[in-house]
Image (cartoon, coloured by chain):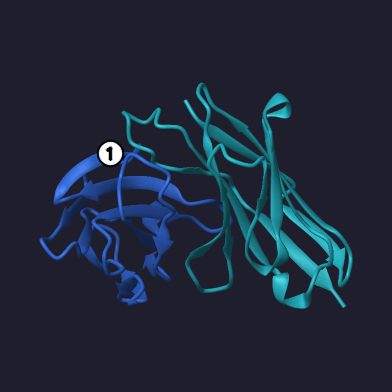
Chain colours: A cyan, B blue
Amino acid sequence: AQSVTQLGSHVSVSEGALVLLRCNYSSSVPPYLFWYVQYPNQGLQLLLKYTSAATLVKGINGFEAEFKKSETSFHLTKPSAHMSDAAEYFCAVSDGSGGGSYIPTFGRGTSLIVHP
Amino acid sequence: ETGVTQSPTHLIKTRGQQVTLRCSSQSGHNTVSWYQQALGQGPQFIFQYYREEENGRGNFPPRFSGLQFPNYSSELNVNALELDDSALYLCASSYLTGDNSPLHFGNGTRLTVT
């Protein structure tokens, strides 16, 4: 069975500071991992995905995430936060354990707050 | 490239009523998934349709049902609405099932049950 834990429902940073959003997963097989972003009153938009190629994955808007199998983690980072990064971020895992279909399971989300 | 569109954007229903939500897939996509997102929570998987057949189902009761049409658009139907059904309902399309194709989401339908 697959599951995702996002540590911290809210993360607050100053503009220009490092952003670190944590995600740990549970999977019985090598998983596919995703980060999505949700702006107010909108659907989710894909930031990046890990598909067993490079362990460091670069996404849109300057975000990147590193897959660490030994830690079962897939934390999202950005060197310098912008005001426009304020949004809800969701980590998701899919490993085909749902009856053979790669249907993602989402975490509860982390709200990123950026202060001027 | 046309994205995923959902209608209506907002809906208010009374407990016990029935509701139908609609979704048009992104062009070229043949798989549609529906998710329920309660306030402050992550999306919860309801079901997925691939080529007009249900391809997977989450932990939702049978009063949640769906359809996918030949043009890959989809409907989510909920009967006997309960207060806890109040949520944002998200439709997502993708090209294939059984792989790592990312989901492309619509902006959702906000359902309020009173």
The location of residue B78, given as percent across then percent down, is 24, 55
In this orientation, which residue lies closer to the viewer: A9 or B104? B104
Chain at tag 1 = B
Number of other residues with Cα within 10 Å of mark 1, as a class: few under 14, some 14 to 19, many 20 or more? some
The location of residue A35, given as percent across then percent down, is 59, 52
Q: Choose top left, top right, bottom left or bottom right for residue A67.
A: top right
Q: Residue furthest front?
A: A53
A81 relative position to A51: left or right: right
User: What amino acid is at disc 1?
Assistant: Gly
Q: What is the count of numbered marks?
A: 1
The residue carrying mark 1 is: B56
Q: Residue furthest left?
A: B70
Q: Is residue A40 above or below residue A93?
A: below
B8 relative position to B74: left or right: right
Q: Quadrant of the N terminus of chain B?
A: bottom left
In this orientation, which residue lies closer to the viewer: A52 or B4? A52
Q: What residue is rendered at 19% in x and 62% in y?
A: B72
In this orientation, which residue lies closer to the viewer: B60 or B72? B72
A49 relative position to A83: left or right: left
Q: What residue is rendered at 87% in x and 78% in y?
A: A116
Q: Is residue A2 above or below residue B78?
A: above
The location of residue B93, given as percent across then percent down, is 33, 59
**Residue B88 in view:** no
**Residue B70 in view:** yes
